[in-house]
Amino acid sequence: MFKNFSKSLNACILASFYSSGSPQFNIVFKNGVFSIGIIWSCFKQLIIISGISFVFTVGFRGAGLQIEFLFFNLVLWFLFLDTTNSTVSLPTKASLLNQVNINSFTYIFGHIIRIAIQYLLILLLSFAIFSLYELEVYYIEILRSFIFMLLISCIYSILLCAALHNKKFLIELHGFFMQGMFFASSTVIPINIVPNPVRDILLFNPIVHIQESIKSNVTGIELYYIDLTYPIIFISIGIFFVLPSLRYKDVKFNEELKIE
């Protein structure tokens, strides 16, 4: 049983990689295809994140924004953003879901694992680049924050994927919510400059605590109200809703496949 699950999960991960790549960039050989599009899809976000980091760092010089933590804050945010938005709007692929041993569990987890692999590669490459420029990077703390953000992204996206299934208006509305959440997640705006009572409200967001935990190592400023217990509580509670959400999603997928 585990062997079948493993094979179907691997198949979904590979299918997700190929669907994320641009076929026009593929190089066709006699015995196969080498997809440059997959490589591009893995690292195009690195270019975007680097550009945004540079703009914010230069544009807000003297405001306390340093590229040493801003870059990694943006990597974590884009991990959350890509995982959530793409999973919530994940289409019903009959060609894949009709295969033996493939269901919503393997389909959705395969998609999320593909994104996690991409951002882990971005993170490791970033570590190498930062070390070449001799910039101080707190590897353990960033990797810990990456794991926290990945778990939160996984839980949140699965719950929303089930709750907003085929509700196009709500999915679009959620996209606007995510844009606002970017500024409320302490990714670029430090939480210590946000006035009360707004700050007290934002502190209920577990992402704020993850993002600020990276900054404290660089700035040397420890904020007493930043506590990684918040993301741990979210993960501990949210994980109990993952399987019911996937089960509900599986029922919806099967209903759509029968109609087709």
Image (spheres, grey):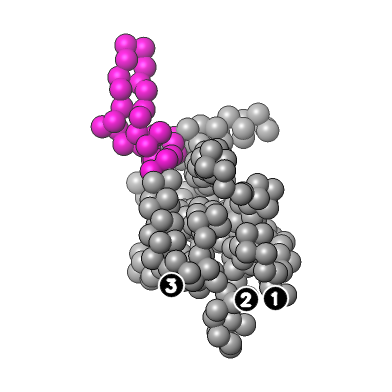
Q: Amino acid at mark 3?
A: Gly
Helix, strand or loop at label 2? It is loop
Q: Residues within 10 Å of mark 1 (few under 14, many from 20)?
A: few
Magenta span: chief secondary structure: helix
Give the residue at mark 2: 203
At 58% across and 29% down in the image, what residue appears? 7
In the image, residue 35 sits, relative to residue 215, either above or below, namely above
Cα separation between marks 3 and 2: 15 Å
Q: Amino acid at mark 1?
A: Tyr
- Labels 3, 1: front one: 1
Kindly identify which numbered label has been placed on residue 180. 3
At 39% across and 34% down in the image, what residue appears? 38
Q: Position of residue 132 (x, y in %)?
A: 53, 38
* Number of marks present in the image shown: 3
Q: Position of residue 140 (x, y in %)?
A: 69, 48
As for residue 219 lying within the magenta part, the answer is no
Query: Relative to the observer, which residue lies in front, 207 or 157?
Result: 207
Q: Residues within 10 Å of mark 2 (few under 14, many from 20)?
A: some
Cα separation between marks 3 and 1: 22 Å
In the image, residue 177 sits, relative to residue 14, either above or below, namely below
The boundaries of the magenta stretch are: 15-44
Kindly identify which numbered label has been placed on residue 225. 1
